[in-house]
Image: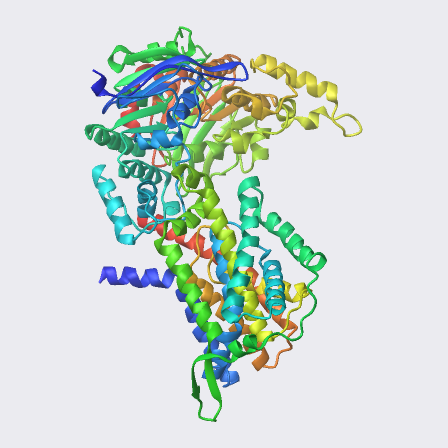
Amino acid sequence: MQKQQQITSKLLFRHETILFIIMIVFGVVVNSINPAFLKVENLFDILKTSSITGMMALGVMVVMISSGMDISFTAIATVSMGVTVRMLIALDKGNIVVAFLVAGIIGALLGCINGFLVYRFKLPTLIVTLGTSSIFHGLLLSILKIPYLYTVPGYYSDFSRLSLFTFTTADGAVVGFSYLTVLLFVMACVVWLILRFTMVGRGIYAIGGSIEAAKRAGFNILFIQLFIYSFIGFVSGVASIEYVVMFRHVHPFNMMNMMNMMLNVIAAVVLGGTSINGGTGTVLGTLFGVWMIYMITNSLILMGIPSEWESVVIGFILILSIGVNAYQKSLRKVEVKIIES
Amino acid sequence: MAEEHCIVMENISKSYAGVEALDNVGIDILKGEVHCLIGENGSGKSTLIKIIAGVITPSRGACITIHGKNYSKLTPVDSMRQGIQIIYQDLSLFPNMTVAENIAINQLLESGKQTISKRLIHEIASNALKTICIDLKLETLVGDLPIAKQQIVAISRAVACGESLIIMDEPTSSLGKKDIDCLFRIIRTLKSNGISILFVGHKLNEIFEIADRVTVLKDGKSLGTHDIHELTYQKVIELMTGKALAISNYERDYPSAEPLLEVRNLSKRFQFKDINFTLYPGEIIGVTGLVGSGRTEMVSSLFGLNPADSGKILVNGKLTPIRSVRDALRAGICYVPEDRLSQGLFMNHSIKNNIIITIFHDLLNRLGLLESGKVKQTSSLWVKDLAIRTPSIELPVKQLSGGNQQRVVIAKWLARNPRILILDGPTIGVDVGAKEEIHKTIRALAGNGLGIIFVSDEAFEVVQHSHRIIIMKEGQVVEIVDSKDVLETDLLEKID
């Protein structure tokens, strides 16, 4: 009985559980205002449109667990998107798988530069990535001279229509479960496995807890840092192709759009319970955070609230969730003290 | 004979920029012994343990033998392979990970495994905890544990790696009495399992309790390894400081004057209750008790930092309510806090500025600016008076040694010409030689007619340097004893 209670209270304590309950309550409330909200097609749509943010959020989460911050991921995405699409058009061959792989590799290489700089010069990660972000994007415009591409090869849009399964709803609409969502689920599983069952994963948490202790314990810090930053580069590259799949154009200047994306991604990760001080964070929490953000923006549209309010709301969520995070931490400290005494 | 040795080090020297940090030092550690390494700050203790860890390479000619294998220098990997682990003062744990993960991680890294499972981690951790006979919840986050338990985790981690030599760098510096006892129990268990311990410390009573043999370092030279039975307190202090100290109990020689401070039924909810005592001019009252006995709360209420709920305070026979630091200062009471680094000093500022901070109002000229002549004069005076060793009063305080820093704090308050001085743990974190200097200062101040309240958890110190001793427990005064009538060991019993 007591054990049962302990497990329940432990579960209730978890950030993911709280977030899940909030999601359900939120869904029910919005649905009572606009019954379109909880329809399967809308939910599948949320899953599909959130997959780009989700992909990048996985990368940001890994960086944040190691108590770093990467704000160059949108620049990396812009560069790998431009280079990959342009190159495959110039070569006049390729398919969607090649596109994903090439963009992922370009992203990983750029991320590697970040990782090396962070390790070698022990600089604040925020500043390093702010610098490289500007360098990467500047080089894209000055040397590579990637132009606007308003048309892209057909395999991108083909992939966007591809679904794992489809079904017809009562009112005759065909609803599909997008491969973009599948891609996010696969990547989430991979990250979960790495974080939970490999020494590299433990190393990422260890660095986030105390880099000095990680060094003394004998972790290979260089390797782990390179892994972390090339991983976020890789998912940014993959996410950039998802962007092409969904929006069918390449826009080398759309940093503004990307800034918005950055806000969404970071807000989602923090909302998902990853500590900005490093050391904690889970894949499930991050996914919940991403979906929560998209549920909110989606509901704003459904409720007819002007889209300008979106960034205001997300900004609030970002600050609020950091506050809640800190509060939960202080609660747990008290709880542990009570148990100890 | 060689079989019994865990590690033998000979001819160990190391110099930094021409300064000899270690000069031809030798140390040998037997299997399953507790070997203490003691010395004042800067005597080369940490350089020596870093050489054992392979972090620092010794100068040429060094000869290190571990388990019969010879090295002229060690790398961190050699050291780890040979089963040596250091538990640093900061413990090097991961606060965001569980107890089990923290214990198992080094072993997992050493075994070169790439993948892990929770079951394996739990198995390693619970075996290690079983070895040292300690029960800890494996799934608790280490950051949530109190420091004493964290230390146990760090020790278990070393045990999990199957280490043969565990080096503990001042392990008791942040522990209370009970936790120290627990640590010592663990050390004895480790010893019985054939694990050697190199215990680096400076608290003498602990060394006499736990050590089998002691190596004393002074100014980078070894003063030999001694069996603990051959040593006495006096002998160790003489070795460490290099001078024979005449330790004598402080004689009661104050005139029977009017009381300076009378405390009547002072109480504060949840902190202390019914405190009564009287302080005479020229008297030193020691206040002792465990951490959490309310001693710090009580004395800080006399300084208005933590005003009491009820009770009376009389200064010079006059009822003086103390509700703020201002009230206390006006009544001539000054307080030197326990944590001089965070509460007492501006570390990056000069000695001069730190000393005059309490009186800078008196040093202003007509334009409201500081008069630099007066500032220099006043601070130089105190530097001389308290024998603060520094080449210049312009030096930032952080460059001074612990003992000298403590004297700057005292100078800062003395500059106000107080009549009552409260010192909370004035010798914490100060090495033996500097401690003596501080004691001398305190005695000299009492000689000048100041009333001094002196909080300390070292019974030895309290007995020797105060007239009367207030023993506190759970917020109440257990007893007020005359230091002439009490032995240190009795005092320890009364505290617990």
Is A240 situated above or below A159?
above
The quarter of the rendered structure image containing the C terminus of chain B is: top left
Viewer-closest of B361 and B53: B53
Q: Is residue A244 left or right of residue B206?
A: right
The quarter of the rendered structure image containing the N terminus of chain B is: top left
Q: Is residue B446 left or right of residue A84?
A: left
Residue at image point 49% right, 56% down:
A231
Q: Position of residue B400 (x, y in %)?
A: 55, 21
Viewer-closest of B10 and A296: B10
Is B90 situated above or below A67?
above
Viewer-closest of B279 and A122: A122
Residue at image point 54% right, 67% down:
A99
Q: Residue furthest right?
A: B367
Is B487 situated above or below B92?
above
| Residue B231 figure quarter | top left
| Residue A193 figure quarter | bottom left
Residue A69, visible in the rendered structure: no
Q: Is residue B148 left or right of residue B280?
A: left
| Residue A83 figure quarter | bottom right
Q: Position of residue B196 (x, y in %)?
A: 26, 26
Q: Position of residue A27 (x, y in %)?
A: 47, 77
Residue B352, visible in the rendered structure: yes
Q: Position of residue B452 (x, y in %)?
A: 48, 21
Residue at image point 70% right, 66% down:
A147
